[in-house]
Every structure is written in C-alpha cells, then in structure tokens.
Image (cartoon, helix red, strand yellow):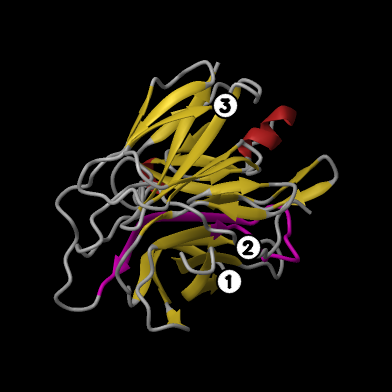
C-alpha cells in the first residue's frame, strides 16, 4: 500500500513570513492554480502521487471544474484506484511526499493557533470507506534539532454527500507554544483500508483564527538563483531575517534528504549540488524567524 498513516517529518514551509504577524497562509486553498506536468496536472504547491501512477496512465488526483467546483473555476478531485495490484487513495499534501518511506517533508508557514481548518467538500464512498481532511501543526526546537507537535485536527466523512457541504476539523492542541509550520493531508479513502472508487472533492480551505487575528498583507521571499541551474546556485536571505544557525536542507523528488548545511553568518550562500543527478529538488530554508521551501531544477 502506497499510503498509510505515517510519522511526519516536517522540516520547512512554502512561504516565508514575519513571525510577528498572524497568518492564514494555506497555499492554493481554492485549487485554482494547476501545473501541467505533461501527462497529468497537479495542484500548485500540493504534492500528489500522480508522478508515480502516471507511469501507468493513471491519475488519482485531477482538476474538477464546472458544477464540481464549489467556487471559482476549479476544485480538487481525489479518487482511490487500483494501480499495479495496489489500492492507492487519492492523496494531496502540502509538502513533499516520499512514497517509499511514507514520510512527509515540508509544509507551510503558520505562526498562529487556528481554532480549526474549514472548507467545502462532497464525497462518494465505495462500500464502508471514509475520506478525510487532516491538519498537523508543529514547531522546530533549535535546542534539540527536532520538530515538536503542537496540535492536530481531522475531519472524516464515512457517508455519501452528493452536494457541497461545509466541514470543520477542530484542532486539538498538545502544547501551549505557537506553531511555525502546518501540513494539510487530503485522502479519498481510509488510511489502512482504502476501497477503489471512493471519490472526494475539496474546495475553499481556510483556517478559522481566534477573534481579533488577521491575515498578513504580504510575504517576504528568499531568492534562489540561478534557477534552473547546473548544480551550483546562490541563496539570498533578506536582511530583516537573522541568518544565525539557519538550516539548509535539500530533498529530491522521493523526499530523501540529499544535503544539509548549518549556516552561522553570511546571508548570501553558495550551494554546490553537482554530485547529484539532474532533476527536481526542494530547498528547505529554516531561519530563527520563519521557514520556507522552494522548488529547484538542476539540469
């Protein structure tokens, strides 16, 4: 089975924000932006299993349009299918998913304590199956070099819902700390007992924030250049961020860490990846203020 409930290794985020500002930073929350990968499309800033299943001409995640979108022009459609003798749930994750180890690296920046994750969905289960939307909040501990759980919430639907309905996944906190990273997982089937034919639609995700907290007006970017490149590139961190003990982790498309560096001084960093093969990588950058993950292409 390609997907089951795994231990999550959450090491970075998709956007860099000032840590003093409250945020509702879910990437591509209405699934309006999609990336054409040739034989399939993926929602921008979300990882799926389409790269693996498309080798057999199968996509478990597709763009839903028309009446299958709750608002805007599109939503996400996840379907559980049989792939080479294995049952594969439709899966979408705000991170980098390793189908071999079943771990997730990455996430997106979140430095508030949302009450819940909400959105719109409809569901067509096969048999006694159940679809789900899950959110996990965590925080990097620089003293232990470990990521610690802050809270999580999950919404599970075991029955058919033929028209869009509103859902809420209440977040249960296990720590009084503020998180710095969030991961959202969408599944068209139960973790351990997926059934082919189950279909989940999701649209318009939003964090429900405590009263009086607003979302940021803008974000700050870290520059990686050139991108694409031939294995050597520079990383420039804006001056408003401390570079003391900045961590740089690079992952391949399987979610395997291929390089790790600890930066102690310079805000302009030169990285050498020439020992790795050409392909798509993800650069995780974690400063004392915030975290970021960015796609990198090595030719």
Give the extent of the magenta segment.
186-209
Label 1 Cα neighbours within 10 Å, binned few <14 / some 14-19 / many ≥20: some
Task: State the separation of the CA atoms marked 1 and 2.
Answer: 6 Å
Task: State the separation of the CA atoms marked 3 and 1.
Answer: 48 Å
Using the rendered view, name the quadrant where residue 103 is placed. bottom right
Residue at the image point whose x is 21% and y is 43% from the top = 239
Q: Is residue 50 visible?
A: yes
Residue at the image point whose x is 27% and y is 60% from the top = 24
Please tell me which residue lies in front, 282 or 246: 246
Q: Are marks 3 and 1 in contact (CB under 8 Å)?
A: no
Quarter that holds the C terminus: top right
SS state under label 2:
loop
Label 2 Cα neighbours within 10 Å, binned few <14 / some 14-19 / many ≥20: many
Quarter that holds the N terminus: bottom right
Judging by the rendered image, the residue that carries numbered circle 3 is: 273
**In the rendering, at what x and y percent does residue 19 appear?**
25, 61
SS state under label 1:
loop
Label at residue 159: 1
Q: Is residue 189 magenta?
A: yes
Q: Is residue 40 visible?
A: no
């Amino acid at each position: 089975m390609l997907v089951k409930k795994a231990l999550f290794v959450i090491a970075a985020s998709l956007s860099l924000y000032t840590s003093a500002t409250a945020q509702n930073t879910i990437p591509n929350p209405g699934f309006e932006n999609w990336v054409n990968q040739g034989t399939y499309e993926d929602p921008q800033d979300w990882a799926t299993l389409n790269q693996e299943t498309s080798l057999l001409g199968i996509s478990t995640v597709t763009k839903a349009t028309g009446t299958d979108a709750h608002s805007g022009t599109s939503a996400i459609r996840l379907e559980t299918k049989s792939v080479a003798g294995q049952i594969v749930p439709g899966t979408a994750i705000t991170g980098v998913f390793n189908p071999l180890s079943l771990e997730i690296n990455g996430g997106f920046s979140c430095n508030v304590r949302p009450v819940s994750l909400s959105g719109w969905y409809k569901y067509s289960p096969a048999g006694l199956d159940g679809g789900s939307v899950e959110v996990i909040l965590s925080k990097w501990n620089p003293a232990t070099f470990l990521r610690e759980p802050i809270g999580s919430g999950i919404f599970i639907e075991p029955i058919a819902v033929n028209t869009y309905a509103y859902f809420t996944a209440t977040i249960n906190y296990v720590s009084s700390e503020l998180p710095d990273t969030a991961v959202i997982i969408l599944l068209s089937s139960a973790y351990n007992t997926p059934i082919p034919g189950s279909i989940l639609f999701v649209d318009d995700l939003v964090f429900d924030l405590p009263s009086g907290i607003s979302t940021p007006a803008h974000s700050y970017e870290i520059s990686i250049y050139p991108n694409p490149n031939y294995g050597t590139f520079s990383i420039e961190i804006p001056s408003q961020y401390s570079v003391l003990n900045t961590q740089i982790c690079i992952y391949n498309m399987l979610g395997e860490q291929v390089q790790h560096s600890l930066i102690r001084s310079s805000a302009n960093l030169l990285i050498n990846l020439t020992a790795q093969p050409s392909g798509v990588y993800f650069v995780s950058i974690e400063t004392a203020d915030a975290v970021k993950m960015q796609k990198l292409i090595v030719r």
